[in-house]
Each structure stands twice: as structure tokens, then as C-alpha cells.
């Protein structure tokens, strides 16, 4: 008796997996030799597999230059598709290797957001998600979610990241904050106090820097201390400025009364509520929005969804 058509699946029309792996490795490295090292085979084996793949597809994938490989337009398209596919396969296999009972979810975010926003909420997370172990990856280096380097990430930016599902959490704005003990009342008072700076990553979308703040405020940056405060041998305001690579340290410096810092209104929210820091005059700089992101297709995994929903509730 003939089987119902709905139960019959047509075979996939794919070239051999070994050939696809050889091509993807060679394209990633731009070299048959380095691809051979990755796959623990000989360079001639890589070359043979790539040539067989080109014959199967009926078109060249590389231009073979002296000591270098260059992708053809067809090769570049195939490489991008294979890279995403192999990344998804690798991430899926890695998830299966994890003990099912642990229900561990790795959340990646920058160091300041981890210290100032996530860690103070850990008790609330444990109460809301008692069966999930939240592993916090705090780094200013962006991780590859498609390859499973983390399960979820909180990122500041545009939210337009290929291969990722993203949801807007909250806007981020920066403004001059300081301890009320400094007694700043007018913008002219900035010339009498240190300006505290924070480093920003080169890829930052709209960094909150003092030159930008003075420009948006329509003011000229102060060039020195007032004559009343500074003796001839005293350092100028610019020489007295402080700079930190971690925004958490800049917040601590502002709390200690060491100057005025451009700080995140999100990350310094508790100090603003308590009055330990005050927001001064002038504009607040828009630096984008925080987004929650995960690899496309993972947002409905039970553990990932539980952490995702909890972060959304806290941001709301």
C-alpha cells in the first residue's frame, strides 16, 4: 500500500558536509593551510574538497592568488550562509551537552551595567526564577550570541543586529551629576571643579563625552579655575581632571565629592533617589537605548524566556 504523501520527506539536496566544512574554514581563514590546521587534515585535502564543491555547484568560490585566497561573489554569499548555519549547529549541540537539570542561563552585559543594575537585583531574580542559575558575564567586549558564547545579552545600541532577536528595554541618557556637598548652582561653577571622564568603546553609537555636552549646552568648555580659587602655582581645571575606564569608579568618585561626572541616569538612579548625587543644569545626552538580545529562535526556550521576561519586568 502506498504511504501517504504527507509522511514522505524529500531528501535534502546538499553537497557533502565535509566539502562544506572545508570551504567554510578556508573562507574564514583565507588560507587552505590554516583551514587544514583547524580541521586536522592536510592542505591538499582542503583544496580537493573545495574543488569538488566548486565542481558540484558549477562555479568558482575562490580566486586563487599568490599566497592568498579571495572569495568570489558567489563564494562570499555561500560563506555567510554557511557561517550562520554552522554557528547555529554548534550552539545547538553545546546546549545538548549541558546537564539538563542545571537550567543555567548566561547573561552578558558590560561591567557597569552588571555592577549597577543586575547585581542589586539578584535577590529578586532568585525569588522570581528559583529553578534557574543565572551566570553573569560582565565584559565590555561584545560576545557572539549566535555561537553560544552567552544565552542573553543586554546591549546599548540600535537593536539592529543580524541573526539576533532584540527587544527595547529603556532609553539611556547621561547628565552632569555630583555630590550635593560641592554646592554647584550655575554652569560657571564648573570651572572651579574637576571634570570626571569615562572611557567609551570605539564602536559606541553616541558616547557621552564632555565636549559633546558643552556643544549641546551651547557653552564653551571652561579653560581654567577662577582667579579667586587658583593661586598662580595651582593646577588648571584641565590638569586636575579625572578619567576612569569603568563607570562604576566614576560614580564612586562623584559620590566622594571629587568632581562632576557625566553619568548614566539609569545606573546612578539609586543615588539620585537618595540624594547622594544631584543632577545639575544643562542637557541630558541621549546615547541610545538598552536592548535585550538573544540568537534568533532561542527567545522561546523555557529558561531563556524566563530570564528574558524577568529582565523586561525589571526594566519596565
Image (cartoon, helix red, strand yellow):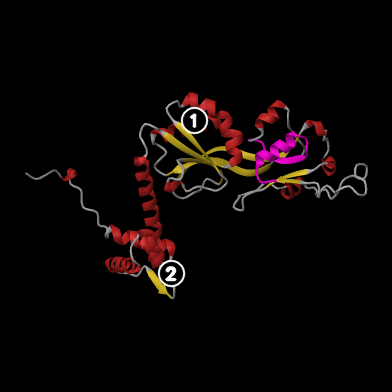
Element under disc 1: helix
List x then y, in percent, for residue 212. 72, 49
Q: Residue at x 78, y 31 (%)?
A: 180
Quadrant assignment, res 138: top right
Quarter of the image containing the C terminus? top right
Residue 15 image position (x, y, % from top left): 27, 60
Q: Which mark is residue 310?
A: 1
Which structural element holds mark 2? strand
Residue 263: within the magenta?
yes
On residue 70, the disc is 2
Residue 54, image x, y percentages? 31, 68
Q: Report if residue 282 is visible in the image.
A: no
Q: Position of residue 58 (x, y in %)?
A: 29, 69
Residue neighbourhood size for the residue with mark 1, other residues' Cα within 10 Å, grouped as few (<14), some (14–19), many (≥20): some
Q: Is residue 23 above or below residue 179?
A: below
- Range covered by the magenta-colored residues: 244-266
Q: Quadrant of the N terminus?
A: top left
Q: Of marks 1 and 2, which one's residue comes earlier in the chain?
A: 2
Q: As rendered, which of 278 and 159 lies closer to the eye?
A: 278
Disc 2 residue crowd, few under 14, some 14–19, many 20+, Cα 10 Å: some
Amino acid at each position: 500500500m502506498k504511504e501517504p504523501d504527507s509522511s514522505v520527506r524529500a531528501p535534502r539536496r546538499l553537497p557533502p558536509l565535509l566539502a562544506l566544512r572545508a570551504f567554510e574554514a578556508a573562507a574564514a581563514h583565507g588560507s587552505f593551510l590554516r583551514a587544514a590546521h583547524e580541521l586536522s587534515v592536510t592542505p591538499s585535502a582542503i583544496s580537493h574538497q573545495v574543488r569538488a564543491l566548486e565542481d558540484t555547484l558549477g562555479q568558482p568560490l575562490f580566486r586563487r592568488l599568490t599566497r592568498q585566497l579571495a572569495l568570489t561573489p558567489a563564494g562570499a554569499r555561500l560563506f555567510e550562509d554557511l557561517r550562520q548555519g554552522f554557528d547555529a549547529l554548534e550552539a545547538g549541540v553545546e546546549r545538548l551537552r549541558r546537564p539538563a537539570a542545571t537550567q543555567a542561563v548566561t547573561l552578558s552585559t558590560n561591567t557597569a551595567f552588571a555592577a549597577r543594575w543586575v547585581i542589586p537585583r539578584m535577590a529578586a531574580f532568585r525569588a522570581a526564577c528559583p529553578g534557574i542559575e543565572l551566570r553573569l558575564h560582565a565584559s565590555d567586549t561584545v560576545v557572539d550570541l549566535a555561537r553560544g558564547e552567552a544565552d542573553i545579552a543586554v546591549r546599548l545600541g540600535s537593536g539592529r543586529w543580524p541573526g539576533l532577536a532584540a527587544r527595547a528595554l529603556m532609553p539611556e541618557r547621561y547628565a552632569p551629576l555630583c555630590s550635593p556637598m560641592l554646592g554647584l548652582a550655575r554652569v560657571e561653577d564648573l570651572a572651579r571643579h574637576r571634570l570626571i571622564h569615562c572611557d567609551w568603546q570605539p564602536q559606541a553609537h553616541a558616547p557621552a563625552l564632555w565636549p559633546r555636552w558643552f556643544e549641546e549646552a551651547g557653552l564653551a568648555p571652561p579653560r581654567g579655575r577662577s582667579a579667586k580659587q587658583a593661586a598662580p602655582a595651582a593646577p588648571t581645571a584641565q590638569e586636575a581632571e579625572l578619567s576612569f575606564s569603568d563607570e562604576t569608579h566614576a560614580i564612586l568618585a562623584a559620590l566622594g565629592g571629587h568632581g562632576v561626572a557625566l553619568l548614566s541616569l539609569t545606573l546612578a538612579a539609586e543615588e539620585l533617589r537618595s540624594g547622594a548625587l544631584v543632577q545639575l543644569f544643562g542637557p541630558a545626552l541621549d546615547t541610545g537605548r538598552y536592548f535585550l538580545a538573544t540568537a534568533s529562535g532561542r527567545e522561546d526556550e523555557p529558561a531563556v524566556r524566563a530570564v528574558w521576561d524577568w529582565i523586561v519586568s525589571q526594566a519596565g
